[in-house]
Every structure is written in C-alpha cells, then in structure tokens.
Amino acid sequence: MTGLDPHQSQRLDDLLADAALGSLEASDALELEHLVARRGAIPTDFDGLTRAAAGLDLALLPPSAPRLPGALAERIRAEGVRRIAGAEGAFADGPTEQDEARQTLPTRSRAPWLAAAGWLAAAGLLIWGVATDLELRRLRGATDEGLAAQRVELEQRVAAAADELAQNRASARAEQDFLRAELARLERLQTQTLTAAATAAANRLAARESELTASFEGAAADRRLAVLEREDELLAEIDTLRRLLDAVDPSILRERLVNEATDLVRWDWATTDDPLVAAAVVRGDVVWSPSRQEGYMTFRGLPTNRADEEQYQLWIFDGTRDAAMPVDGGVFDVRNPEGALVVPIDAKLGIREATAFAVTLERAGGVVVSNREHLLLLASG
C-alpha cells in the first residue's frame, strides 16, 4: 500500500466530490477506484458512508438553512424514493410482528422515507460545498501559476525583441555607411572616366586637326571628300562627349571640391586692357587642388563667342616649367554672358606648382601654342 502525493490527493478530492454529485464518468470512476485503493484509509463503499453522514448533518441543520439547487434536489429525491420502494418490497410476503408493531404507530409510518430523503439531500449539500471549495482553490492556484509563467514569458519576449531591434539598427547603420562609401566611389570613378575620355578626345582632335590640315593642302578632290566625311564623324563624336560632360553638373563638382580639398587655391579673375573685355565687367574666380589635379573656373559677364569661328582657351603657368610654354587647360564657349558659367579645368599635362591662370581667345578648337594676341583674363596669387 502506498500513499498519495499532493497532486493525487487533490485529484482524489475532486473525484469524490463528482461522485457525490452524481456526475462521475466511467473513466473517472476507474481513476477514483485506483486512488482510493492507493490511499487505503478510505473505504471503497464511499457512497453509503457519505450519505449516512450527510443525513445526520441535515437532521441537525436549523430550519433557516438554504435550500439545494432545484435539479440536484430533484435527483436526490428520486434516489430516495427508489431506495424506499425497494425497502417496502421486502414486505410483499406478509407482515411480521415488527411490521404490525409499526402499524400501531401511524405517525411514524413515513419516517424511513423522510430520513432517507434527508440523508440524500444532506450528502448532496455537503459534497457540493466541499467540491466547490476544492475546485476554487485548484483554479486559483492554476491561475496564479499561469499568470506568473505568462509574465516571465512576456518579459523574455520583450528582452529578445529589444536585442533584435538593436541588432537591426546596427546592421542598418553599417549598410548605410557602406552604401554611402560605394556611392562616393562610383561618383569619383565616373568623373575620372569622363575626364579621361574628354582628354583623350581632345588629344585625338588636335592630332586629327594637324592631319586634316596637311591633307587639305596636298590631297586630291576625292581625298578632300573623305576628309569631310571623317570630319562629320568627329563632330558627332565631339557632340556626344559634350553631352556626356554636360550630364555631370560642373557646379556640383566645384562645390564638392571646395568643401573637401585641403590644399585648395582660389584666385579671382582680373581683366586686361584688351578691347574685347575693356568695356565688360567680368567677375568670377578659379579654384585648383594640386593633390587632386582638379579645378574649375567661374565667369559672369564674359562676352559671348562665335563657337564656329573662335573659342576661349585656358592656359596654366607652372612654376616648374618655362613661362613661355604654359600648359593647355582646355577650350570653352560662353552662350549667356549674364548667367553664371562654371567650366572644369582640363589640364593636358600634370601641374606641379600653379602660379597663374590666363584666358585667351583663339580660333575654334583651340591651339597648341598661343600667340597671346587676345589675352583677356588673368588670375594669380
């Protein structure tokens, strides 16, 4: 014979309460029998004992005691009638001396029925109260444990969500820094590619110009026609390159250089006494970064040129080179004198020590060496 743990004892109390109320199912009845056998101190004939004890308890109740629920009272009354009917069947073969003695007392002829009904009602009331109290205590304990477990789970989930959010934010910041660095790299690569393409195209154009000049002087008519066709191809190529250069806003590139370069040189333009600019009010400057070999010119008020006949050309004076041979800085046009014009510097050679910048007016396409007939602007430190 073994005892019961607290959980099994609680379960035994629940099953006993259900048995007294008449709501015990077949599987629960087997479990009740098993637990009673393990307990050892509770008889298996629990129904008869509880009903007898309940009868005595009901007999002592005051008249003002509360009534049972209607459905339960009806079931207990039916059970009492059934038992009394069974007891009265024992007299079917004839009354005994004791039966005749009972018949002499008419006031007690219904006492067994009333006693049985009282026992049944008392048993139902007693067990119903015990079962209700046990069930409330069991539910309260289960609820407290469930709430505590849910609170622990919620705290764990909140902590996990906070950790995940922090990781996501860190990952997002790292991704943003990577994308910014990649964008800057691509912009630098695009600028370098366009600058190199423009330089190469200008070199090819200058070389081709010399070739065309020689061809025009000594070639036949059919050769002249071929040269003209090739010239159209070159002009289309130049237009394509100019559109590519226009796609990159020089003002944005200049602003970036001014904000980023630590060795930036900036000088304002000054007009000469050349008649082309003597009456003009030209404003602007030139910025140059030796470490980046990058620079930009700005103009406002510079007269419009006839692009098919003449172009402005920049010359860069390098302190490490002969002053009579300044470096070609590229050609440009002015279409709107009143508007602000930003022109990238396209140095054909590396500039080690810029000492001055000059703008001349040359024939269309520029020249390799300027005679400085029209020296218009100067900028120096």
Image (tube, rainbow, N blue to C red):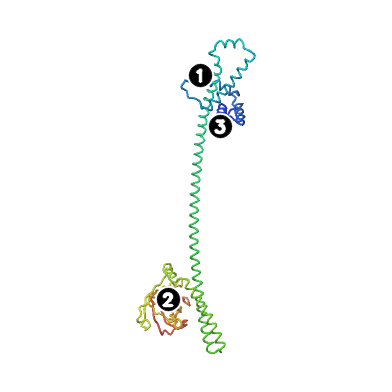
2 or 3: tag closer to the N-terminus: 3
Q: Residue furthest right?
A: 93
Q: Which mark is residue 299?
A: none
Circle 2: is it few (<14), some (14-19), or many (20+) Cα within 10 Å?
Answer: some
Q: Which residue is mark 1?
A: 59
Q: Which residue is mark 3?
A: 7
Q: Which residue is mark 2?
A: 354
Q: Residue 259 at x, y = what percent? A: 42, 67
Question: Real-space Cα distance between discs 1 and 3?
Answer: 34 Å
Q: Secondary structure at mark 1?
A: helix
Q: Is residue 85 above or below residue 320?
A: above
Q: Nearer the viewer, residue 335 or 327?
A: 335
Mark 2 belongs to which amino acid?
Ala
Please give left or right for residue 45 compared with residue 294 in the image. right
Q: Nearer the viewer, residue 95 or 247?
A: 95
Q: Residue 360 at x, y = what percent? A: 42, 81
Q: Is residue 95 above or below residue 47?
A: above
Question: Real-space Cα distance between discs 2 and 1?
Answer: 124 Å
